[in-house]
Amino acid sequence: MSAGFKYNIEPEPSIEERYDISTGVRRRGPYKLDTTNLVTGSFLPSFTPIAADLVKKTAQVAIRVEVYEKFTTGSNTTLKIKKNSLAYVGMHLGNGSHGATINSIDKSNKDFDKLTLSADFGETLEAGTVLYEATAVSGTTPKVIANSALYGRVQVEEGIVLVALLMRAFEIEPTKLVMPFSDIDKANMPHFQFNAPDVTQSGKAVVAKASSSQDGLMSKEDKAKLDGIASQANKFTLSAATSSALGGVKQGVKVDDATGQEDAHTKLNALLASLRTAGVIASK
């Protein structure tokens, strides 16, 4: 009797809904995926950020990494990032103002991957910060900027890999995405609506930054501005006027008009007394 067939097929993992699927609209395709620097046999999860050439019908993964633990600059070349990223040795990381090159990747820890950088990144990075793949070690320019998202889970294979892409989706839950989107991606995707981060994530409270229209946490930039304002900096005290400096004076008491020669002398003295009391002229 035949022993039958044995299949070694990796099943589709069970995942939470990452966006309102009723709002998802696919691009006309398929698109040819650029598999450069992607590991053959690995899987790209649905909603991976994609930079699509709408004319040539090609797609390139916008590789992003999310900082797992606060990175403090200062001769520091170790950066912990969340697992399952597509980072690779030799890749440049950047945030628009600073950058570094990945020299090695340690994936032995079950909670995070540890990057060894070629040099200190040059800026302190808070946990949750998303860095992009940059064109150079300076980190000022992203290699690509996403304008789409991968529609379904795709395996990277040798040869041509065709993929379907999303051009619109609403109520996206960022904390449920395997691959993060950077701020530059979101600004380039007007037909994608990202929700604020969940109230809790991995047991830690996560609150979005405050804006002019939404309550939230203060950004480090705004906090620095506030710290730079001296105590009672807007408190103003008007000093008295002197013979050499402008200042505040009070309104003098009323002095009636003079009606005769003798009355003029009396009125003049009354006027001078009023001006001295008010601080308009010196008393001595």
Image (cartoon, rainbow, N blue to C red):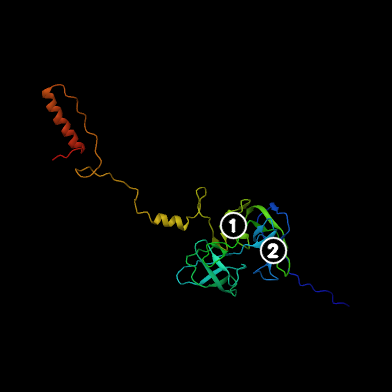
Q: Quadrant of residue 196?
A: bottom right
Where residue 133 sits in the image (x, y, percent)?
58, 65
Secondary-structure class at tag 1:
helix
Contact (CB < 8 A) between labels 1 and 2?
no
Helix, strand or loop at mark 2: strand
Residue 137 in the image, given as x and y percentages of width and height:
53, 68
Distance between the alpha carbons at the discs numbered 1 and 2: 18 Å
The earlier-in-sequence mark between 1 and 2 is 2
Q: Which image quadrant is residue 282 in?
A: top left
Q: Residue at 10% across / 24% down in the picture?
A: 262
Residue 226 left/right relative to 28:
left
Read off the residue under disc 2: 33
3 with respect to 252 (left or right):
right
Residue at (17% x, 31% y) in the render:
271
> In the image, what residue type sits under mark 1?
Asp
Label 2 crowd (10 A; few <14 / some 14-19 / many >=20)? many
Q: Name the residue under label 1.
A: 185
- Residue 198, visible in the rendered structure: no
The residue at the far top in this view is 259
**27 horizontally vs 105: left or right:** right
* Residue 30 on image: x %, y %: 73, 58
